């Protein structure tokens, strides 16, 4: 049986890896939970590549499993997102960062003419296609308590007390003011929409 492949997408800027410990921790947890091994990927192997890059933002993409690891590093351009469509799937799961994203990609095809999707599972908001989300209400940012995939940026923002976990129902979206999309490559605050830019 061919082992399942996992991916890790990491921001490289100014020739260094950002949120290094959070990525290292997730890779180690994935290998332990899914492959039953206590192992770590040696990040020293990436240094020659990173040192040769321009200091602009790049995406380091690692594909790995229990006995395999390869990577690419490419320039990263922030995607423009100005509208979201709520799509519902009560069966969707993506608890680990699998290379196979077919289920998510099928939901993404339902976005119609909007830029991205906002996934609703069992009545609660989870994530967008590639990002965790946070919503603003009365000066505080709230992120779904049960995202499909708890991201590394989300973990750091929670540790820094910049966002707070909450159950956010699709029916309550109108009670919030703004929404932010973020992940390891998209910094918190770089993609922000008024709540009226979310459509059903």
Image: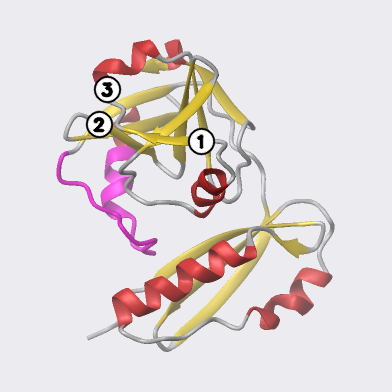
Judging by the rendered image, the residue that carries numbered circle 1 is 163
Q: Identify the element where label 2 is drawn.
A: strand
Taking the magenta stretch, the answer to whether it contains residue 104 is yes
Q: What x and y, as percent, mark residue 51?
A: 82, 71
CB contact under 8 Å: marks 2 and 1: no
Position of residue 15 in the picture relative to residue 183 (left or right)? right
Q: What's the residue at 61%, 83% (across, down)?
A: 42
Q: Earlier in the sequence, mark 2 or mark 3?
A: 2
Q: Earlier in the sequence, mark 2 or mark 1?
A: 2
Q: Depth check: 137 or 86 in front?
A: 137
Q: CA distance from mark 1 to mark 3?
A: 19 Å
Position of residue 74 in the picture relative to residue 95 (left or right)? right
Quadrant in the rendering for residue 53: bottom right
* Up-down relation of residue 190 to residue 151 (above or below): above
Q: What's the residue at 44%, 30% (across, down)?
A: 142
Q: Is residue 56 visible?
A: yes
Label 2 packing within 10 angstroms: few (<14), some (14-19), many (20+): many
Q: The C terminus lies in which quarter of the figure?
A: top left
Q: The N terminus lies in which quarter of the figure?
A: bottom left
Q: CA distance from mark 2 to mark 1?
A: 17 Å
Magenta region: 90-108
Taking the magenta stretch, the answer to whether it contains residue 35 is no
Judging by the rendered image, the residue that carries numbered circle 2 is 124
Position of residue 71 in the picture relative to residue 146 (left or right)? right
């Amino acid at each position: 049986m061919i082992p399942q492949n996992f991916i890790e997408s990491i921001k490289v800027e100014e020739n260094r890896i950002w949120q290094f410990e959070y990525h290292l921790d997730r890779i180690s947890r994935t290998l332990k939970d899914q492959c039953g091994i206590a192992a770590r990927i040696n990040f020293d192997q990436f240094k020659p590549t990173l040192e040769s890059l321009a200091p602009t933002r790049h995406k380091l993409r690692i594909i790995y499993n229990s006995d395999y690891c390869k990577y690419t590093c490419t320039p990263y351009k922030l995607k423009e997102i100005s509208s979201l469509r709520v799509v519902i799937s009560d069966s969707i799961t993506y608890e680990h960062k699998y290379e196979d994203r077919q289920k998510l990609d099928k939901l993404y095809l339902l976005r119609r003419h909007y830029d991205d999707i906002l996934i609703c599972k069992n009545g609660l908001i989870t994530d967008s296609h590639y990002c965790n989300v946070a919503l603003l209400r009365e000066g505080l940012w709230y992120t779904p308590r049960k995202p499909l995939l708890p991201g590394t940026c989300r973990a750091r923002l929670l540790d820094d007390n910049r966002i707070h976990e909450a159950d956010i129902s699709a029916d309550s979206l109108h009670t919030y003011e703004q929404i932010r999309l973020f992940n390891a490559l998209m910094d918190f605050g770089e993609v922000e929409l008024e709540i009226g830019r979310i459509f059903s």
